[in-house]
Image (cartoon, rainbow, N blue to C red):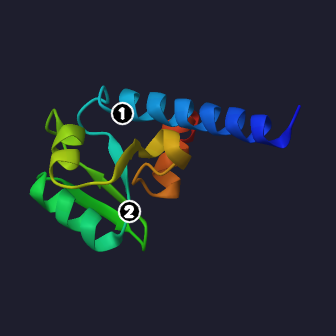
Amino acid sequence: MPLGRITGATALVVLGWLAVVVALTFGSAPGKSMAVIGPQSQALAAITRANGRILASNDYVTIARSDDAGFVARLYAAGALLVLDAEQAGGCSGLSPSLRAKRSNPSLS
């Protein structure tokens, strides 16, 4: 198989996966943590305009949450480049490690 076909197939799979993940994010329940991907200043401004709470932030990933329905759509409308479910995107729930451990293992409570 030529290198160009492998590269094209890989790109198609990655883009397909990204499209599915982004589409599923719109169906997220209110109160879930969202990872806003993009420059920090742009993400912070979008979260503020979308009435969200900022949980954590670094140069290119900002974690935010809102208890209101439609948060993801408001983030995109406010200028967010990419919004993903933070828990599915890498375990970023906005919870401290001890609370995360208790949530995943109720016997620790």
Relative to 1, 76 lies left or right: left
**Res 48 seen here:** yes
- Residue 38 is marked as 2
Query: Toward which corner of the image does residue 3 lie, by quadrant?
Result: top right
In the rendering, at what x and y percent does residue 101 appear? Answer: 55, 46
Count of labels shown?
2
Name the residue: 47% across, 27% down: 20
Residue 65 placed where, x, y %? 26, 49
62 or 56: nearer the eye? 62
Q: Amino acid at mark 2?
A: Gly
If you read the primary sequence from the N terminus, does the residue marked by circle 1 or circle 2 appear first?
1
Work out how far the residue at label 1 is from the one at label 2, CA to CA, in angstroms. 16 Å
Instruction: Give the image location of residue 30, x and y in percent.
Output: 23, 34
Q: Amino acid at mark 1?
A: Thr
Residue placed most toward the observer, 22 or 27: 22
- The residue that label 1 is drawn on is 25
- Element marked by disc 2: loop
Q: Quadrant of the N terminus?
A: top right
Name the residue furthest right.
1
Residue 109 visible in rendering: no
The structure residue drawn at horizontal position 16% and vertical position 34%, both measured from the top left corner, is 70
Label 1 vs label 2, nearer the camera: 2
The residue shown at (68%, 37%) is: 8
**Residue 11 picture quarter:** top right
Q: Position of residue 109 (x, y in %)?
A: 49, 41
Q: In this image, 104 relative to 6: left or right?
A: left
Q: At numbered mark 1, what does the secondary structure look like: helix, strand or loop?
A: helix
Compared with residue 43, is residue 58 higher up or lower down, i.e. above or below? below
In the depicted view, which residue is nearer to us: 27 or 101? 27
